[in-house]
Image (cartoon, rainbow, N blue to C red):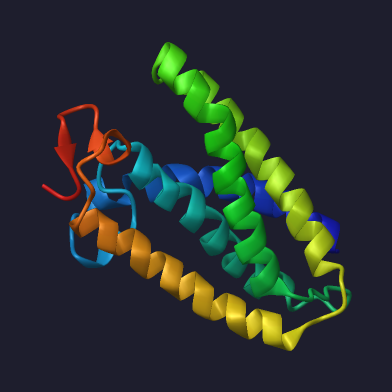
Amino acid sequence: MNKKFIIYNIILTFIMGFLVHNLYNWLPTTLTSIFPVNESLFEHIKLIYLSPIISSITLYFYFKKFKDFKVNNLLFGLIVSTIFNIIIFYLVYLPLYYMYGSIMWMTLTIYFLTIIFSQYLYYLIIELPNNHKLNIISSIMLIIILFILTYFTYHPLKIDFFRDPTNNSYGIR
């Protein structure tokens, strides 16, 4: 059942990326500023961060009704795989971005492949024996990271990584 959870999570995370990417544009409020607010490389971290979190939590509540579904270390696996996804995505994407610019099919392909790799790591972690302390620490880390990402949306550094290339702005306008 955990394999099915991961497969569904790969698909839902990819789809959720589109929704997370556009939510602030559709509903520009303080509450939705936790989602990407512009096209900067920094704001896309929020997309890569939030999509698997929303997908995993949604699927967890759906799958938990099945008797053969047992997930250990859900939050720990989520934090590790999400951070891994961000690191791998940018290690692969940034050199290509600086050489060729933003090419949608390339970006989406890299994003999908990094979701697969990070979800495989997630699968390995949720199959381990449960560690309650790691899950508590991970839940605190999830909130702290979200706070930091939101903070830099309102107080971006004036460097290229935070600059929206579509209008040369930084953070929320």
* Residue 33 appearing in the image: no
Is 153 on the left or on the right of 149, as rendered? Answer: left
Q: Is residue 110 left or right of residue 170?
A: right
Tell which of 30 and 16 is nearer to you: 30
Image x and y of residue 169, in percent: 15, 37
Q: Give the residue displayed 73% in from the left and 43% down from the top.
A: 117
Q: Quadrant of residue 104?
A: top left
Q: From the top left corner, tell me how far across and down residue 133 is, in percent.
A: 69, 87
Q: Is residue 164 above or below residue 148?
A: above
Extreme left residue here?
Answer: 173
Horizontally, residue 147 falls left or right of residue 57, namely: left
Residue 95 visible, this orientation:
yes
Position of 17 with respect to 116 (left or right) is left
* x then y, percent, for residue 46: 41, 52
When the figure is inspected, residue 126 is found, relative to residue 135, above or below; the finding is: above
Q: Is residue 68 above or below residue 81?
A: below
User: Residue at the spot x=59%, y=29% of the render?
Assistant: 92
x and y percentages locating residue 116 in the rendered image = 71, 42
Split into 4 quadrants, where in the image is the N terminus?
A: bottom right
106 above or below 30? Answer: above
Q: Closer to the camera, 132 or 74? A: 132
Tell me the quarter of the picture where residue 11 sits. top right
Q: How many marks?
A: 0
